[in-house]
Image (spheres, grey):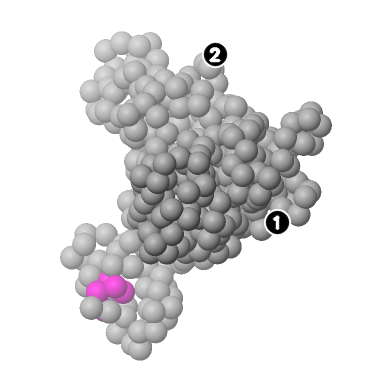
């Protein structure tokens, strides 16, 4: 039995990693191997379809990467257990099957085009055509499979750090159409990109670190003036801790009624999640308000232990309040209504205030941003220009400072 035939049979009997055969490149590759004893038209069609696909996917010179990447992003009992650090609890036979699958995938990834063509049953009959066929290159394997040396320890460690399935491929997600959808181009802002608000940011970082470490932590409400970096703080912290297995899922506030569905989907996953609600506020106490209140504290279907809720708002108390709400016609009901309006924000264990900077703090932010961007202007010039810019914008804020400095680069 030659190496190509053995590889085909090994792929046929994949077990734990069988899910990769649903992916387009491994599936087309397997169909090519199955056609090695078929008539020339069928074999050449399979070869052409496979090469067309790998060329379209940009992996004609790195087939090994494409094959092993499919395994990296496969979600199965081993990758889920490894991502959660519990792979050593799997039965011995399952771990043996994982090793066998890894060997089969590596063998398939490293087969050369010439080896496959040389194994074709009727190669002599169509030798002139075979000579003209394009050849793929194997290249290098994906990072996780470079570590496979017969032991699963290093492979498991990789999954533990990077997650598995869709949560290994992507780092940020949004709740859309009743499901968790990946964000293809997420904001890559880093905590080192900020100027000012070190105390506020430190509180959120510490809370997140405690969450990652399995210690006591709280749902967090970041509230305050617009443009002060509340949303950017949440996104930057998610980026900072992504290698610790943290993922962020944003749920639009108008879809808060779907919150129980979202938490059901992530509750059994080994990764940890920040559920992000941006610009949270309510015109009245509607169904979304009641749903979020129950999830934060008090409902039967509480948030899972692998998730924290981080919300941002320009309102501390979240519900819009008018003077008519404070009518003293019925003192008992008025007090009840006010207590109900305050009850949601009170259920966030950590509340961090981002207030607009003073004129001095605003100028300091502008000067530090200008220095980072190598803008050669005196502090007096920057302060004068920044103040004029802030008057036009109608407010001083870090966002305004950034926009002013960016305008100097135009």
In the figure, residue 269 lies in which quadrant? top right
Spot occupied by residue 270 in the image (x, y as percentages of width and height): 63, 35
Q: Which mark is residue 300?
A: 2
Label 2 element class: loop
- Residue 181 visible here: yes
Q: Quarter of the image containing the C terminus?
A: bottom left
The answer to whether residue 358 is above or below residue 43 is below
Q: Which mark is residue 147?
A: 1
Kindly identify the residue that appears in the image at 50 percent across and 44 percent down: 36
Label 1 element class: loop
Kindly identify the residue that appears in the image at 43 percent across and 53 percent down: 125
Measure the alpha-carbon separation of dots 2 and 1: 44 Å
**Chain-order first, disc 2 or disc 1:** 1
Spot occupied by residue 196 in the image (x, y as percentages of width and height): 47, 64
The magenta stretch spans residue 405: yes
Spot occupied by residue 29 in the image (x, y as percentages of width and height): 48, 46
Magenta segment: 404-408
The magenta stretch spans residue 269: no
Q: Quarter of the image containing the N terminus?
A: top right
112 left or right, relative to 284: right
In the figure, residue 100 lies in which quadrant? top right
Dominant secondary structure of the residues highlighted in magenta in the image: helix
- Residue 316 visible here: no
* Mark 2 surroundings: few (<14), some (14-19) or many (≥20) residues within 10 A: few
Kindly identify the residue that appears in the image at 40 percent across and 29 percent down: 179
Kindly identify the residue that appears in the image at 71 percent across and 53 percent down: 148
The answer to whether residue 58 is above or below residue 264 is below
């Amino acid at each position: 039995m030659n190496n190509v035939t053995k590889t085909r049979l090994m792929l046929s009997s994949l077990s734990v990693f069988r899910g990769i055969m649903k992916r387009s490149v491994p599936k087309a590759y397997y169909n090519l191997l199955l056609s090695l004893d078929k008539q020339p038209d069928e074999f050449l069609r399979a070869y052409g379809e496979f090469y067309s696909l790998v060329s379209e996917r940009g992996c004609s010179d790195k087939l090994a990467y494409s094959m092993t990447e499919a395994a990296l992003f496969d979600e199965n009992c081993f990758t889920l257990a490894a991502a959660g650090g519990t792979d050593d609890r799997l039965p011995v036979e399952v771990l043996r099957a994982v090793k066998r699958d890894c060997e089969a995938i590596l063998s398939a990834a490293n087969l050369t085009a010439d080896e496959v063509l040389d194994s074709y049953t009727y190669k002599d009959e169509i030798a002139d055509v075979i000579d003209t066929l394009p050849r793929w290159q194997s290249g290098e394997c994906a990072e996780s499979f470079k570590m496979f040396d017969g032991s699963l320890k290093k492979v498991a460690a990789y999954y533990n750090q990077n997650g598995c399935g869709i949560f290994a491929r992507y780092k940020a997600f949004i709740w859309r159409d009743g499901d968790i959808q990946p964000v293809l181009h997420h904001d890559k802002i880093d905590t080192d990109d900020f100027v000012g608000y070190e105390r506020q940011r430190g509180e959120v970082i510490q809370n997140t670190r405690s969450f990652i470490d399995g210690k006591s932590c709280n749902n967090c409400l970041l509230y305050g003036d617009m443009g002060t970096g509340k949303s950017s703080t949440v996104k930057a912290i998610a980026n900072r801790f992504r290698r610790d297995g943290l993922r962020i899922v944003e749920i639009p506030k108008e879809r808060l009624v779907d919150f129980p569905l979202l938490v059901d989907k992530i509750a059994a996953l080994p990764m940890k999640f920040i559920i992000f609600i941006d610009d949270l506020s309510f015109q009245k106490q509607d169904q979304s308000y009641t749903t979020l209140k129950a999830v934060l504290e008090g409902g039967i279907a509480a948030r899972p232990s692998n998730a924290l809720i981080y919300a941002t708002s320009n309102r501390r108390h979240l519900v819009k309040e008018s003077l008519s709400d404070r009518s003293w016609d019925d003192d008992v009901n008025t007090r009840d209504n006010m207590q109900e309006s305050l009850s949601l924000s009170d259920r966030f264990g950590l509340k961090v205030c981002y207030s607009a900077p003073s004129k001095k703090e605003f100028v300091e932010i502008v000067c530090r941003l200008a220095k980072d961007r190598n803008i050669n202007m005196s502090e007096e010039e920057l302060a004068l220009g920044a103040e004029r810019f802030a008057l036009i914008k109608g407010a001083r804020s870090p966002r305004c400072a950034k926009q002013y400095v960016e305008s100097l680069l135009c």
